[in-house]
Image (spheres, rainbow, N blue to C red):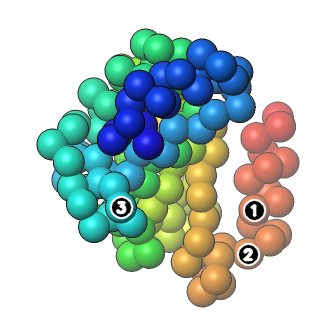
Amino acid sequence: IAVQQPDTFREWLGKYSAEKIILGADSNNRKIATHGWMQQSELDVVDFISDYAEQGIIYVICTDIQKDGMLQGTSNELYREIIEKTGVKLIASGGVSSIDDLFALRELGCDGAIIGKAFYEGKIGFRELQKVVEDYKL
């Protein structure tokens, strides 16, 4: 909706609290992808997020499609750029392969991370996740 019907999305931002809306920004080679990642736009992911940050969006989930499910680490440089240029509360998605990736994302300033395959394949367990949460509270 935010890509193909931006006026509707902006209307929602005005109608509902921006704290209740999370912008999804799936990217492939820095370009926003839609329709279950089957269509790629010409929109740069950082510019896309920046535009909505200027309109009040607070939370963003950004998935690097090339990293998703690959267990090859996260797109730290992209996430750093997004945080520095937009100031959004970023939830990183794609590529988490170990607990070290979660600590690195936290160091970058990410507000969260989506863990999928690393958890399902036992590369990250509940005890390790508990350690991340406990360390975060310090």
Instruction: Look at 60% across and 65% down and name the residue there.
Output: 115
Q: Which residue is mark 3?
A: 35
Which corner quadrant of the image does residue 47 belong to?
Answer: top left
Q: Which residue is mark 1?
A: 129
Q: Position of residue 38 (x, y in %)?
A: 28, 67
Picture layout, residue 81 above or below residue 14: below
Residue 38 visible in the displayed image: yes
Mark 2: secondary structure: loop
Q: In terms of depth relative to the viewer, which is nearer, 23 or 90?
A: 23
Q: Are marks 2 and 1 in contact (CB under 8 Å)?
A: yes
Mark 1: secondary structure: helix
Give the amino acid at mark 1. Answer: Leu
Q: In 3D space, how far apart are the residues under numbered discs 3 and 1 (Cα atoms)?
A: 32 Å
Q: Position of residue 53 (x, y in %)?
A: 46, 20
Q: Position of residue 77 (x, y in %)?
A: 32, 42
Give the amino acid at mark 2. Answer: Gly
**Quadrant placement of the C terminus:** top right
Q: Which residue is mark 2?
A: 125
Q: Residues within 10 Å of mark 3 (few under 14, many from 20)?
A: few
Q: In terms of depth relative to the viewer, which is nearer, 41 or 114?
A: 41
Instruction: Look at 59% across and 71% down and name the residue there.
Output: 116
Instruction: Look at 82% across and 69% down and name the residue there.
Output: 127
Q: Residues within 10 Å of mark 2 (few under 14, many from 20)?
A: some
